[in-house]
Amino acid sequence: MPKILLIRMSSMGDIIHNFPAVTELRGHFPNAEIHWVVEEAFVGLASLHPGVNRVIPFALRRWRKSLFTKSNWVEMRAFRMAIENGRYDIAIDSQGLLKSALVGKLSGAALVGYSRHTVRDPLACLFYDRRFDILPIHVIERNRLITGRALGYTPEGKLDYGIQPPKLELEWQPKSPYVVCLTATARDAKLWAEANWIALCQWLQLAHGLQPVFPWGNEVERARATRLAEALPGSLVPPRFSLVEGARLLADAQVAIGVDTGLMHLAAAVDTPTVGIFCDSDPHHAGATARTFSQSLGGVQQPPSVEAVREVVSAALAARR
C-alpha cells in the first residue's frame, strides 16, 4: 500500500484545482494512504475530499508574523516531525515553489516536481528527484498530469472534483431561489464595477426572480457587499462563513457568478453552474471549470460587458433546469 504526500498548500483556488488529481489518484490506487499539506486556513476545504486520509496544516503565514516566539517554534518542530516521520514512498509538489519543495524534501521521500522550464520557481528544481515537463495549460490539467506521471498512469476521463457539499443547515440561507454574486477578489484590478453588478442583479431579480447573495471575507468586502445590497432591495449580505459552509451555500444556488476568486472555483467544484468574470487575469490558465456548466469571460485588462455576462448567465440558468 503506497503512502503518498501531496504538497499544494495554497491558495484556495489552487487547492480546489487539485481535487480532480486526488480523485484520479484514488481511483488508480484505492488502497493508498494519501496525506496532503495545506495552509492551516484551508484544512477544512481540503478535508472535503473523501480520498484524503490526512490533512496536515502548515502555518507559515502565521509563523512569519512572530517567528521567534516559543509557541511558534514548538509548532514548527511538530510540523517538521510529522513530515519526517510520515515514511512516505513519494512526495508530489504540484505547487512548484521553493517553500513547497522544501516541505517535500523534509519527507525524505522521492520528491517529484516540474522541470526548470515549466516550474513557477526555478529554485524549487534544485530539490526535486524527478522532474516533468508540463506545458502551461489549465492548472487542473497540470495537476492531473504531474500526479499521473509521478505515479505511472495517464490521466483520462471526465473531470471529477470528487467532493460533495456537507449536509448543513444554515439559518441565514435563503429559502427562495437565489444567485451567489462573488464580487470580491485579492486585487482591485480584478474587480468588476459595482454599477455592472447592480445592472446584472436587477435583471436577475426582474427576469428570473432570483435573490442576490453577496458574500464577503473582510471589512472592505463587507462594505462593498452592503452598498450593492442597498441598491438592490431584497438582496442578502450573509454573515461571514467558513469554507465548508460556503460549499453548502454555493451548491444550493441556481447559479454562481464571480470574479477571479477562490469561491468561484468552489462553486464549480460542487457542480453549480458557474460564470467567471475575468478583468485582469487569464481565464485560459484558471477559468471556471464545472461538470454542469461553466464559462469565463474577459481577460487581462478586458472586463466583459454586462450584456455579455447576461447572455452567458442565461445559458447557465438553462443548464440548471
Image (cartoon, helix red, strand yellow):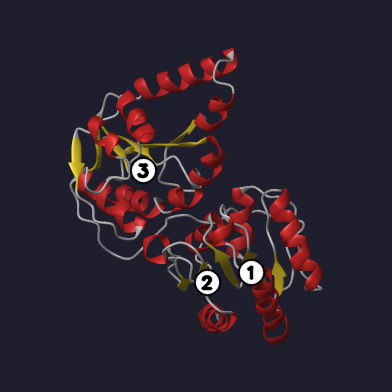
81 and 203: which is toward the camera: 203
Name the N-terminal-most of marks 2 and 3: 3
- Identify residue type, mark 2: Pro
- Identify residue type, mark 3: Gln
Name the N-terminal-most of marks 1 and 3: 3
> Where residue 243 appears, x then y in whole percent?
60, 49
Residue at image point 69% right, 73% down: 195
Label 3 CA crowd tier, 10 Å (few <14, some 14–19, many 20+): many
Identify the disc placed on residue 38. Answer: none
User: Residue 32 occupies which quadrant of the picture?
Assistant: top left
Residue matched to label 2: 303
Q: Are marks 1 and 2 in contact (CB under 8 Å)?
A: yes
Q: CA distance from mark 2 to mark 3?
A: 28 Å
Q: Is residue 206 above or below residue 21?
A: below
Q: What secondary structure is found at the residue carrying circle 3?
A: loop
> Where residue 188 appears, x then y in whole percent?
59, 57
18 relative position to 227: left or right: left
Quadrant containing the N terminus is: top left
- Identify residue type, mark 1: Ala
Q: Are marks 2 and 3 in contact (CB under 8 Å)?
A: no
Quadrant containing the C terminus is: bottom right
Residue matched to label 1: 193
**Residue 177 is at least partly visible in this image:** no
> Where residue 151 appears, x then y in whole percent?
21, 44
160 and 95: which is toward the camera: 95
Residue matched to label 3: 95
